[in-house]
């Protein structure tokens, strides 16, 4: 640890003399590169093999498991957030203790949510003045933890016992209705699993005196795909909007030979959703899932731009508005649930085959 500290101290002295924007850009690129290596099975296995050869171990045992880094997806995005905001001058002053605590805050270390540094710092700085044994805060935190435990270990884990789509179940199912049941089971399992972990994280955070941001807001009840992404894994969606969609669309708009507005929206939405997809793992399936949602968001944007006047007219027709709301909710839910095919299965070809089988084709 002393040696590592001396190395980092020497690097810090050298980097202070460099252009800080370039230094921060370099650190961001290193973080992204490390993320890609750890999230790509082939690359991670090769690094493991190299590491084993350098340490005299059996290289035939090399595996991606050797380089598993607990919570790195969330660490990387928190680091990129603070580095980029520091680069643009909007990051408030943080002490080393505040920054490190923010990045590796225990309750949200593994499964989020992805808090913003400035919001976290406010709660952190207020800790010395809050009441330690605050009954209301403790009860609220304990309630969220209990709800989260029930969602995760009762509902989600029960669905995982044969009522949720996976590669094994997919190979055994022999009818479209059965496939739909498994796919809906997976959609519910995913929500209750991740939502449960989020409740647990928020509850533990409250016990510490830190109110982490909400991550879900009844996403399966939304009536269009944009609203879904404003209520599903909200902190990740906000991160992607701040650091992918907005800068990319601005860069495209500022080009001398800029694309059309429609093309800019399409490219920005695809890039944003592909980033969210690959954040879960650098695989073709997650890439396809990102494309699926990117195209869905683009189609919804084009539709709303062309039907805004007609939709406003529905406020004077309550029956038609309720019917349209029901139709759009059902269509949005089907789009999201079908998209989970790319998420649930490891093979792109299997996902494509099951996509057509959902509609009774190819059995």
Image: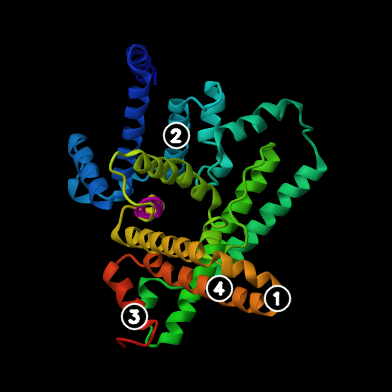
Determine the CA span between mark 1 and mark 2: 48 Å
Disc 4 target residue = 328
Residue carrying label 3: 356
The label nearer to you, 4 versus 2, is 4
Mark found first going from the N terminus, 3 or 1: 1
The label nearer to you, 3 versus 1, is 1
Earlier in the chain: of badge 4 and badge 1, it is 1
Q: Are marks 3 and 4 in contact (CB under 8 Å)?
A: no
Q: Are marks 1 and 2 in contact (CB under 8 Å)?
A: no
Label drawn at residue 318 = 1
Front residue of this view, candidates 60 and 241 = 241
Q: Are marks 2 and 3 in contact (CB under 8 Å)?
A: no
Q: Quick one: 131 or 352, which is closer to the camera? A: 352
Which residue is identified by label 2? 79
Secondary structure at numbered mark 2 = helix
Q: Nearer the viewer, mark 1 or mark 2?
A: 1
Separation of residues labelled 3 and 4 (CA atoms):
22 Å
Q: Of helix, strand and loop, which one carries label 4? A: helix
Cα–Cα gap, marks 3 and 1: 37 Å
């Amino acid at each position: 640890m002393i040696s590592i500290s001396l190395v980092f101290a020497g690097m810090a002295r050298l980097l202070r003399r460099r252009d800080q924007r370039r230094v921060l850009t370099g650190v961001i690129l290193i973080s992204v590169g490390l993320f890609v290596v750890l999230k790509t099975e082939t690359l991670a296995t090769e690094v493991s093999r190299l590491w084993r050869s350098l340490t005299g171990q059996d290289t035939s045992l090399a595996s991606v498991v050797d380089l598993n880094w607990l919570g790195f997806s969330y660490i990387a995005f928190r680091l990129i957030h603070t580095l980029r905001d520091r680069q643009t001058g909007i990051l408030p002053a943080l002490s080393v203790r505040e920054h490190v605590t923010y990045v590796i805050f225990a309750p949200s270390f593994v499964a989020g949510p992805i808090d913003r540094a400035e919001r976290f710092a406010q709660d952190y700085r207020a800790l010395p003045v809050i009441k330690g044994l605050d009954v209301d805060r403790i009860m609220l935190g304990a309630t969220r933890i209990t709800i989260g435990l029930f969602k995760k270990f009762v509902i989600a884990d029960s669905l995982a016992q044969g009522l949720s789509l996976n590669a094994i179940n997919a190979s055994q199912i022999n009818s479209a209705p059965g496939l739909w049941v498994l796919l809906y089971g997976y959609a519910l399992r995913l929500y209750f699993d991740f939502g449960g972990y989020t409740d647990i994280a928020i509850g533990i955070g409250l016990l510490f005196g830190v109110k982490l941001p909400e991550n879900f807001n009844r996403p399966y009840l939304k009536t269009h795909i944009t609203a879904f992404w404003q209520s599903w894994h909200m902190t990740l969606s906000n991160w992607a909007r701040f650091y992918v969609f907005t800068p990319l669309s601005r860069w495209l708009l500022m080009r001398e030979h800029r694309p059309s507005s429609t093309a800019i929206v399409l490219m920005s939405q695809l890039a944003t959703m592909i980033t969210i997809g690959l954040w879960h793992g650098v695989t073709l399936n997650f890439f396809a899932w990102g494309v699926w949602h990117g195209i869905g968001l683009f189609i919804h944007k084009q539709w709303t731009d062309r039907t805004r006047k007609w939709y406003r007219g529905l406020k004077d027709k309550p029956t038609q508005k309720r019917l349209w709301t029901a139709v759009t909710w059902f269509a949005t839910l089907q789009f999201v649930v079908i998209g989970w095919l790319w998420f649930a299965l490891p093979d792109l070809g299997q996902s494509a085959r099951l996509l057509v089988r959902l509609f009774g084709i190819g059995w």
